[in-house]
Image (spheres, rainbow, N blue to C red):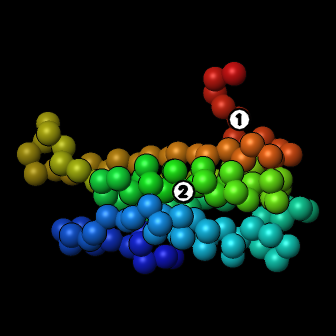
Amino acid sequence: MPDAFVRKPGVRVPEMTNGGAYHLIDRVASTAVGSRGQIRADRPGMLVIGGFCLVGEDLPRLTAAAEQYMRRRGGRYPFLSSIGLTFMAYGRNPSLYGAARAMPGFNWVPNPHAKIRFPQSPVS
């Protein structure tokens, strides 16, 4: 797991830069997508990248980086349907004193050049 996604609760970590987000997406995709990767022409699919305790603008930066990756390299990989960004954060529960709650989320960026469509948009 990339160190950028490993955060310890209560430890302040600087937010990811735009360049850092693109480097992370590019590095993860380069190992998972292509002729030697898990996602390839004979095994199409969705690349999912996850993190815990993303802060501030991390998720919008990662989403923008995934969109940039798809614009630059999506045409080369039509078997890559999309990039999913999943994350888990936590926060205080305002209705229960001292309690915390998990806040899961999932964003996905489709590949406009994909030969397959997954996942399908709920709004058509």
Q: Which residue is mark 1?
A: 120
SS class, disc 1: loop
Q: Residues within 10 Å of mark 2 (few under 14, many from 20)?
A: many
Left or right: residue 3 versus residue 35 is left
Residue drawn at the location 35% of the way across and 53% of the way down? 57
Q: Quadrant of residue 75?
A: bottom right
Query: Quick check: 77 above or below 97?
Result: below
Query: Quick check: 99 above or below 18?
Result: above
- Judged by depth in the image, the label closer to the viewer, 2 or 1, is 2
SS class, disc 2: helix
Mark 2 vs 1, N-terminal side: 2
Q: Quadrant of the C terminus?
A: top right
Asked whether the viewer can see residue 53, the reply is: no
Residue drawn at the location 39% of the way across and 57% of the way down? 58
Residue 80, image x, y percentages: 76, 55
Residue 98, image x, y percentages: 10, 51
Q: Nearer the viewer, residue 66 or 117?
A: 66
Q: Which residue is mark 2?
A: 65
Name, please, the residue furthest toward the top. 124
Say what amino acid the circle numbered 1 marks: Gln
